[in-house]
Image (tube, rainbow, N blue to C red):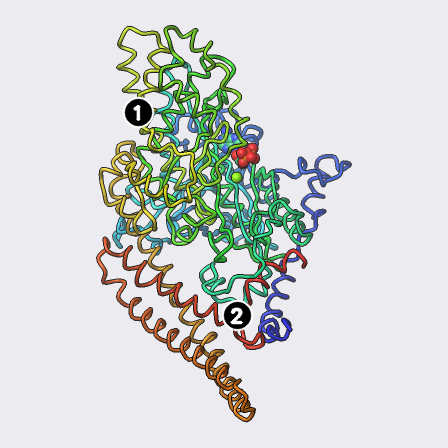
Amino acid sequence: MQEQRFQVLVRAFSRASQEHRLSRTPLNMTDYSVRGLGAGLGGTESPQRVSQYFGINAFTLAHMRERLPKEAYRDLLKALDQNKKISFETAEAIAVIVKDWAVQRGATHFCHWFQPLTGLTAEKHDAFISIQHTHHSETYVIEGFTGTQLIQGEPDASSFPSGGMRSTFEARGYTAWDPSSPFFILEDGRTKTLCIPSVFVGYHGQSLDMKTPLLRSIEELSKAACEFLKLLGDVDVKRVTCTLGAEQEYFLIDENFYLARPDLYMTGRSLLGAPSPRGQQFEDHYFGAIPSRVKNFMADLEWELYKLGIPVKTRHNEVAPSQFEVAPIFEDLNVAVDHNLLTMEALRRVARRHGLVCLLHEKPFAGINGSGKHCNWSMANDKGENLLEPGHTPHQNIRFLAVLSVVLQGVYDHADLLRYSVASSGNDHRLGANEAPPAIVSVFLGSLLENILDAVEKNQALKATAKEIIDLGISRIPNISKDYTDRNRTSPFAFTGNKFEFRAVGSSANPSYPMMVLNAAVADSFLKATEVLKTYLKSDVARDEAVLQMVRKLLAHSRPIRFSGNGYSEEWRKEAKERGLPIAPYTLDALQFLKDSRRTEFLVKTKILSQDEINSHYQIFTEKYLKSVELEVRVLLEMVQTQVLPVLEKMLIQKRQLISVFETLRDGTVSEGHRDQATLVDFYQKIRRLVEQLGTHLSEIHHIPHQELSVFVETKIMSPMRELRGFCDRLESLAPDELWPIPKYREIILTLPSS
Ligand code: ADP
Ligand code: MG
């Protein structure tokens, strides 16, 4: 039956996908490169142990240490430590060893790999070849790669959006090597490309990408945190780094369904589709046995990621049918972001090798869970101590409380920009829905920590001397990780034992942006806290006492951001409003925060974004949002007109014929026939009317003043889209199966486990 309905589509696409699959045969785990490696290692051990191929496609600092002349390596380290430029000689030396390594691994091209503001990543490939001349003017080819090519590329990238920052006569953007992230070789089919992680900047150094602001935020956070920690007594701290472990959720579906759904392949989400009678109500998918087809995919994915040096650790089914998650062991933030982008890229690429498609959209299917990217974030000092880990000594615990209160203050003061940082057209369908963190930023701490903070705030933990603090339990803070049991799934920003988990981030997002804003918020808070602490230290109290005074002040200030209740509830929405927390239900509302310089001032003050950059982000992200909305409307209208209405017309004709049969029966069925017909006619008229309305509204969208756009889009576009979808979905459940041309939810999401 199903087969019948899809025959045409499947036939149309099977050729394409067969060829597709042939050209992308799944990697054999004993692929030549590993055998080669095994041989290189002595060749006797089984090449299948992860430790043997982990990182074979990455060129890290360890490789540099091993292969660079001592002088050059020292110069590189100095540049990295002090955030300074690398000398020309060192760049030349690095270019030589990186090229040798890449060419040996089979790479033919190199590219500066960067993160423009619109998409996720961009690359422009150049071949390693360089033409040489003998002095008899004969030419020959060698593999060439220079220090200049390593350090800077000049992509012809004038069509990347700059939001007005580049005028056309200086439209060029430059990519520049980011030495703090490893080089890697991207393998795709038979091609291998050396990728140079890069920033993308304009002629005057203005950022045109996501990596530049992230790197600045890491730097500024480090400076602000060090100054603060020194006041706490950590006098020898030189650097504070941020860590990220990004849990990536995604859907997998069979590519035949994907190819038969224009909405999925053009917009990433289904714009139509009646709910499947069986959805996630049995909760049998979450952590269930992973279907073998998916397991094979995961093994292949992990193999690719391990070769790139990405430490993926966990894989499991997620809540919705056909939804899964992959999570790495946390790493340095900048590297972790690059690795997350590579993971998303690999998810998509490897899925196609298995005849599957990976959907990274935040809400590919209505009515079942959407996908997020939980960003686990923390900070560490140069001894590798996690600053959000309650420690074994009283000092570590005071530091923990101090840093925690700084983060709380930062999140409270900049909840508006944090909300903005996760806004996207896709995430609009996820945030606030009943399975995802709400669009209001709040912090969940857990009852144990709440109690400790309450005690600190009420001064119960501090009577007279630092010693008593210890007696009163602060030294026993390490037990917080046991508080896992009362985790609050509804919180967009939760403390989970020794790190914060920013759950509102969307699955398809570049995590760079929310992490940059979070760093900026915390850096700003460190600066403020330093001032507060300095004044307390001037008075005649012991240092720990002064620190606790500061902690108390910050906690009292940021109290409204702490919320332990149900983030999905309507009461919370009301309460949040009373608490004065910023509320921005949709992307366009969140974007308005950027127009308010009081809200964005801290970004400029911490030198993480300039006012020009903020303005350009506003333009670029508003445009990007409107473009995706427009695309969705156009795709929906096309599907309705070319797929749904023709079905309805056929149904009307069939109904008419049926009525003439009923008429001959003269038994009352005829009135039922007329009733059904009237329902269909009503659908027909309503659908036609909504199609017309949406078309008109779409043409108005560019004439609406920006402040009114959010309301316009919600009432004149989103709401009629939902209404139109409602009729189409009801029609889907009435239409003869053989007439309905669009794969149904149940077929798409429930058949994978058994395939
Ligand atoms: P949970 O069960 O709370 O989600 P996990 O230990 O599974 O905790 O961690 C989830 C993610 O958080 C993983 O990617 C993990 O590496 C990461 N993580 C753990 N500690 C830190 C940290 N200090 N900083 C950043 N991420 C961390
Ligand atoms: Mg999680």
> Between residues 27 and 489, which one lies in front from this camera angle?
489
The quadrant where residue 23 appears: bottom right
The reply to whether residue 152 is in sight is: yes
In this rendering, the answer to whether 682 lies above or below 190 is below
Residue of label 1: 527
Q: Is residue 230 left or right of residue 69?
A: left
Q: Residues within 10 Å of mark 2 (few under 14, many from 20)?
A: some
Quadrant where the N terminus is found in the figure: bottom right
Name the residue nearer the viewer: 356 or 563. 563
Is 467 in front, or is 10?
467
Residue 107 % position (x, y): 57, 48
Residue 744, labelled with which disc? none
Q: Residue at x 38, y 21 (%)?
A: 226
Kindly identify which residue carries mark 2.
733
Q: Position of residue 174 (x, y in %)?
A: 36, 46
Q: Position of residue 50 (x, y in %)?
A: 67, 38
Can residue 60 be seen from the camera position used here? no
The amino acid type found where label 2 is placed reads: Ser
Q: Nearer the viewer, mark 2 or mark 1?
A: 2
